[in-house]
Amino acid sequence: MGTLTVWKFNTADGADAAERILIDLSKQQLIKVSDAAVVSWPEGKKKPKTRQASDMTGAGALGGSFWGLLFGLLFFVPLLGMAVGAAMGALAGSLSDVGISDHFIKEVREKVTPGTSALFVMTSDAVQDRVVEAFAHADPELLATNLSSEQEASLREAFAD
């Protein structure tokens, strides 16, 4: 199992730029990317655009159905009605096993809004200092992760500098 993280950017194209950095880091073998997806929400749009980052996914990729379920829970459930919402709510319970809790869903919903973007990524084997260095100028905000509390605090501290 890898680490699932969600990085928010204050521009609608910030996650696209971060994806390019992530691809480069992956090619340098500074991080292993199992799967990734990008959410971009241009200002003035009713809902975000979502896509799986297919050019860097490897064995163990979560797949389109995972991202579809997750993004449905995050952004589209209110549009689908109560019956579908209840069914998806039941499915959401199983997502807590990979660090996706109600708190996660609420925080992402509140912060990924029109004019912003987010990079969702499942990784392992990261050379943390090099990854932090590569992303420093992008000014990401770590929204959620399934890292331990100590690991998450360390990562937040590294990006706060």
Image: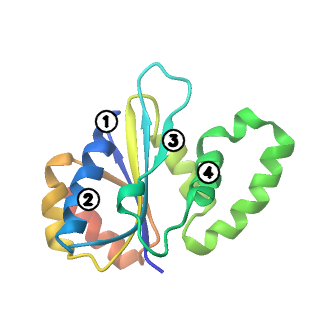
Q: List the residue tagged with mark 2.
A: 23
Question: What number is the disc on residue 110?
Answer: 3
In the depicted view, which residue is nearer to us: 150 or 75? 75
Residue that mark 1 sits on: 13
Residue beneath the point at 20% across and 57% down? 160
Q: Earlier in the sequence, mark 4 or mark 3?
A: 4
Residue 113 horizontal side relative to residue 103, left or right: left
Q: Identify residue type, mark 4.
A: Gly
Q: CA distance from mark 1 to mark 4?
A: 21 Å
Counting residues from the start of the chain, the first of labels 3 and 2 encountered is 2
Given the image, on which type of amino acid does mark 3 rest? Glu
> What residue is at 72 percent from the left and 33 percent from the top?
79
- In three-dimensional space, the C-alpha distance between marks 3 and 2, rounded to whole angstroms, equals 28 Å
Q: In this figure, which residue is indicated by the disc labeled 4? A: 68
Gap in Å between the C-alphas at discs 2 and 1?
16 Å
Callout 2–callout 4 Cβ contact below 8 Å: no
